[in-house]
Image (tube, rainbow, N blue to C red):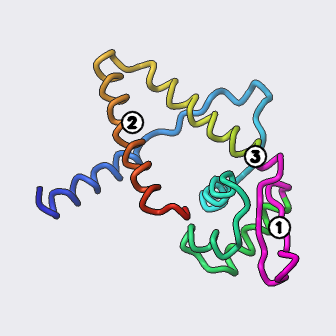
Amino acid sequence: MTDSSRQAKLDHLSDLMESMPIVTPDASSGDFPEYELTLSQFKAMTLLQKGPQRMSDIARHLDISLSSVTNMVGRLEGKKLVQRTHDTADRRVVTCELTEEGLNAVTWIWQMGRRGMLAISELLEDDELDQLIRAFEILVNAARRAGDENPNE
């Protein structure tokens, strides 16, 4: 496969992902927290789910400036989803970690995403479901390989 045809396929995949309707479970059950998170905030919280992280590591992971991370973490602290701590040996070093509410928020958001995907998947024919499962197996394996190549992320 040529580089241009591979790029065309990746572009098509990206277009498909962007055109995917967001399916969420019925929020009328009353069990619908209003986290109002940006994608960057959610990505940061997903990173923090792995454990406490230095502010500089969050900035590097998100590919944004340290001042942007500082502002974002401040907003997450205001929502009581993240807490900052200063290193006792070096006060310039600040680490962040999820609060219990922050961990609950990340878990809840992932569960809602899974429920939405399962609702869509129930509409698939058996052979389509088999294809989707195989595609996810391929993606999971690729993500694991990527994680092996980038152990600090």
As drawn, the label of residue 84 is 1
Q: Describe the element under mark 2 as helix, strand or loop.
A: helix
Distance (Cα) linking label 2 and label 3: 25 Å
Q: Describe the element under mark 1 as helix, strand or loop.
A: strand
Quarter holding the N terminus? bottom left
- Which residue is depicted at the point 56% across and 32% down? 114
Answer with mark 3 or mark 1, whichever residue precedes in sequence.
Answer: 1
Q: Are marks 2 and 1 in contact (CB under 8 Å)?
A: no
- Which residue is depicted at the point 32% across and 23% down? 130
Type of residue at label 3?
Leu
The residue to which callout 2 is attached is 136
Distance (Cα) linking label 2 and label 1: 35 Å
The residue to which callout 3 is attached is 103
Residue found at the very far left of the displayed protein = 2
Q: Is residue 117 above or below residue 101?
A: above
Q: Is residue 93 above or below residue 30?
A: below
As drawn, the label of residue 23 is none
Q: Residues within 10 Å of mark 2 (few under 14, many from 20)?
A: few
| Residues drawn in magenta | 79-102
Give the x, y percent position of residue 91. Answer: 85, 82
